[in-house]
Image (tube, rainbow, N blue to C red):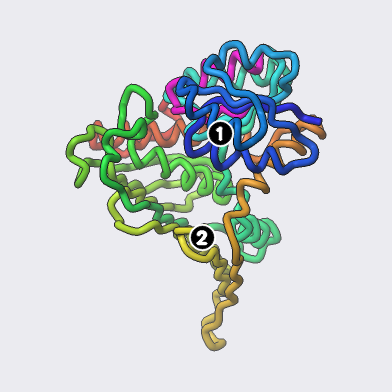
Amino acid sequence: MLRVAIIGSGLQCRRRAPVVKDDPGAELKVIASLHLDHARKMAQAMGCEASDRWESVVFRDDVDAVLVCTPPHVHADISVAAMKAGKHVLCEKPLTRTLAEAETMVRVARETGRVLKCGFNHRHHPAIWDAKRLLDEGRLGKPLIGRCRYGICGRPGYEKEWRADPKQAAGGQFIEQGTHAMDLFRWFMGEFRDVACMTGVQYFKEQTLDDNGMAVFRMEGGATASLHASLTQWKNLFSFELFGEDAYVIVEGLGSSYGTERLVFGKRDFDAPFAETVTEYRGGDRSWNAEWKEFMGAIRDKREPIGNGRDGLEAMRVALAAYESERTGRILKVRDIA
C-alpha cells in the first residue's frame, strides 16, 4: 500500500486526488496547502487529513510518496525535502523555474534512490501513446517534421491568477502549456539542437508574462519542429503532428473541452488513392489514471518512470533557451543554456 500526500489544493489536486483515492493500491493520507480552508474542503471530500504545513507533511512516517501540485516557485524546495525524507515524488510541470533547481532535483533523486516523475500526463493520452508505438515500430520512418498547436481560451481575471505572477510561475503561456509539446517533440524526435522564438503579451495587457509564444526548433537528427502556445485562441485546442519519411500521425483533442481525442494515421504513397485511418478515443481524459499507474509501476519495479526528472529538466532547458532567443533576437544552441 502506497501512502500518499498531496501538496497544493488547486486544479491539479482536484484532478489527481480522486485518482489516488480510487486506486486500491494507494491510500491518500493528507492534503496540505497554505489555503487551509481549500485543503480541508478537498480532504473532507477525499476522506483524508488536511494541513497547512507541507514542511511537516513530507517528514511523516506514514507517507511514502508526495505529489507536488503547487505553483513552480516552490517545486524544488518541496521535492528535494521530500526525497531527502525518503519519499517518492511526482511533481507537476514545469519542473521548476531554473535549471539549477531542476538539476538539484535530479541529483537528489539519484542520490536517494527515489522515483522523481515530472507531470507530463500528455505522454499518457492513448492517442499519443499509440502514435509513439507506430513510430517505435518503424511505421513512420525517420521523423522529418513535427508541429504542435496548443492553446486555451483565456478567462476574465486570468491576469490575477498565479500563472500570470512572475514571482510564482516559471514563465508565461509558452512554458506553462508549451512544455508539454516540447517534451513530446523530444520523446518522438530526439534531442533539441537549435531554437528561435517570439513571445509576447497580445491581449492580457495587465500581465507581464506572455500570452502567446511561437518557436521553431531543429533537432539533433536534422528534423524540424514548430510550436504555437496560446492563451488567446478563444477555444481549447490541441493538435500534435509528426511527419516521417514513410507516414504521418496527427493527434487532435485531449477529451473534455478539447474535443474527442483522435489519432489520424496516413502513409506516403504517390500512386494509390489518398487514405487515412482515424481512431477515436471516446470518453473522458484517461491520461491522469495512466500516468498514476506509471508512477506506481516505477516505484514497484524500482526503475525510472516514463517522463522522469531528467525529461523535466530537458524540457526546461529548451523552454529557457527559447525565451533567451526571444530576448536576444538570435537563433540559439539549446545546449548553450546552462
Residue drawn at x 62%, y 16% as measured from the top left: 57
Residue drawn at x 52%, y 62% as measured from the top left: 251
Q: Which residues are magenta?
A: 66-84
Q: Main secondary structure of the magenta part?
A: helix
**In the image, residue 2 lies at what x, y percent?**
77, 29
Residue drawn at x 69%, y 20% as measured from the top left: 87
Residue 70 in the figure: left or right of residue 210: right
**In the image, residue 41 lies at what x, y percent?**
53, 32
Residue 336 sits in quarter: top left
Q: Is 39 colored magenta in this rendering?
A: no
Sequence order check, earlier mark of 2 and 1: 1
- Does residue 10 lie above or below 66 as drawn? below
Amino acid type shown at disc 2: Leu
Q: Determine the secondary structure under disc 1.
A: helix
Neighbours of disc 1 within 10 Å: few (<14), some (14-19), many (20+): many
Quarter in which the N terminus is drawn: top right
Q: Nearer the viewer, mark 2 or mark 1?
A: 1
**In the image, residue 50 lies at what x, y percent?**
59, 23
Quote the CA–CA distance across marks 2 and 1: 40 Å
Mark linked to residue 42: 1
- Does residue 1 lie above or below 240 as drawn? above
Amino acid type shown at disc 1: Met
